[in-house]
Image (tube, rainbow, N blue to C red):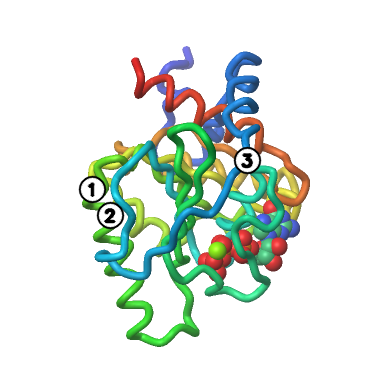
């Protein structure tokens, strides 16, 4: 007789179904409302000393250079040119803070894994990002963006380990879903679901998005709305 429970849990490393986040209509609506107001740039910090005071509830967007962090912030806020984007990697070079009328603050981060940046610059960014992640009491969640065309890379896994050790809440968001077939995206998401077994601090459910088509944006807004409700409870 087949042991169904063993089949469902599946050994780590063996292909398994991706764990995908599902939200109720009410949560989707709460997410829409959360982002309906006018978002604006508030400040930029290139060093620990220039970080703004810890006010509000911060959500930071991290990921490899060019993965689409700034584009996703524009998609969420419905403002095409709020965060600066570029076809060439290395566009965002500071921590950039955005705010609307509510308590929520969005933080666009410099990308990692940008090979062409000078060693000094990479060291300075890495230092800034690490200090920010470790010492930010009002940082409610980090969204780690993974390129849907490439899946989880070793450098991404290193970042997840840093987030684990900083005891931060984080969730994976796939980007550029419009650039990849549904089958390939599902395979990358399944492999990431398996890899997350080694990262207990990670939120286990993934969200796939496209800033180009708007796919997954309502779900990501709902995830953030749910997080705010959970924090208030
Ligand atoms: P850095 O600031 O350099 O770390 O990059 P980033 O992660 O902020 O990426 P950015 O938002 O600047 O986007 C990089 C490139 O990817 C731009 O050319 C975007 O137009 C493109 N891009 C971003 N999101 C999507 C998407 O969902 N679909 C497609 N097709 N292209 C995207
Ligand atoms: Mg950027």
219 in relation to 163, above or below: above
42 in relation to 201, above or below: below
Crowdedness near tag 2: few (<14), some (14–19) or many (≥20) residues, C-alpha within 10 Å? some
| Residue 29 x %, y % | 64, 20
Residue appearing at x 41%, y 22% in the figure: 6
19 in relation to 189, above or below: above
Residue appearing at x 52%, y 35% in the figure: 101
The residue pinned by badge 1 equals 166
State the separation of the CA atoms marked 1 and 3.
32 Å
The residue pinned by badge 2 equals 162
Crowdedness near tag 3: few (<14), some (14–19) or many (≥20) residues, C-alpha within 10 Å? few
Q: Earlier in the sequence, mark 1 or mark 3?
A: 3
Answer left or right for 1 relative to 179: left
Residue mark closest to the camera, 1 vs 3: 3
Residue appearing at x 57%, y 37% in the figure: 207
Judged from the image, the secondary structure of the residue bearing numbered disc 1 is loop
Judged from the image, the secondary structure of the residue bearing numbered disc 2 is helix
Q: Earlier in the sequence, mark 3 or mark 2?
A: 3
Answer left or right for 125 relative to 152: left
Residue mark closest to the camera, 3 vs 2: 3
| Residue 119 x %, y % | 35, 85
State the separation of the CA atoms marked 3 and 2.
33 Å
Marks 2,1: beta carbons within 8 A: yes
Judged from the image, the secondary structure of the residue bearing numbered disc 3 is loop
The residue pinned by badge 3 equals 38
């Amino acid at each position: 007789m087949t042991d169904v429970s063993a089949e469902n849990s599946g050994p780590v490393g063996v292909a398994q179904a991706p764990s995908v986040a599902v939200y109720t209509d009410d949560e989707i609506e709460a997410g829409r409302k959360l982002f309906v107001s006018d978002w604006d740039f508030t400040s930029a910090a290139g060093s620990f000393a220039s970080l703004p005071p810890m006010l509000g509830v911060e959500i930071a967007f991290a990921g490899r250079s060019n993965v689409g962090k700034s584009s996703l912030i524009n998609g969420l806020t419905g403002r095409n040119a709020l965060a600066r984007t570029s076809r060439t990697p290395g566009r965002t070079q500071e921590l950039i803070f955005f705010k609307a009328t509510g308590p929520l603050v969005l933080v666009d981060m410099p990308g990692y894994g940008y090979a062409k940046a000078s060693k000094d610059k990479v060291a300075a960014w890495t230092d800034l990002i690490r200090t920010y992640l470790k010492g930010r009491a009002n940082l409610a969640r980090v969204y780690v963006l993974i390129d849907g065309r490439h899946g989880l890379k070793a450098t991404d896994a290193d970042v997840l380990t840093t987030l684990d050790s900083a005891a931060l809440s984080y969730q994976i968001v796939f980007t550029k879903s419009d650039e990849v077939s549904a089958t390939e995206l599902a395979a990358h998401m399944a492999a990431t679901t398996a890899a997350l077994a080694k990262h207990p601090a990670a939120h286990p459910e993934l969200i796939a998005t496209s800033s180009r088509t708007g796919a997954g944006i309502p779900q990501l807004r709902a995830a953030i709305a749910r997080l705010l409700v959970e924090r208030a409870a």
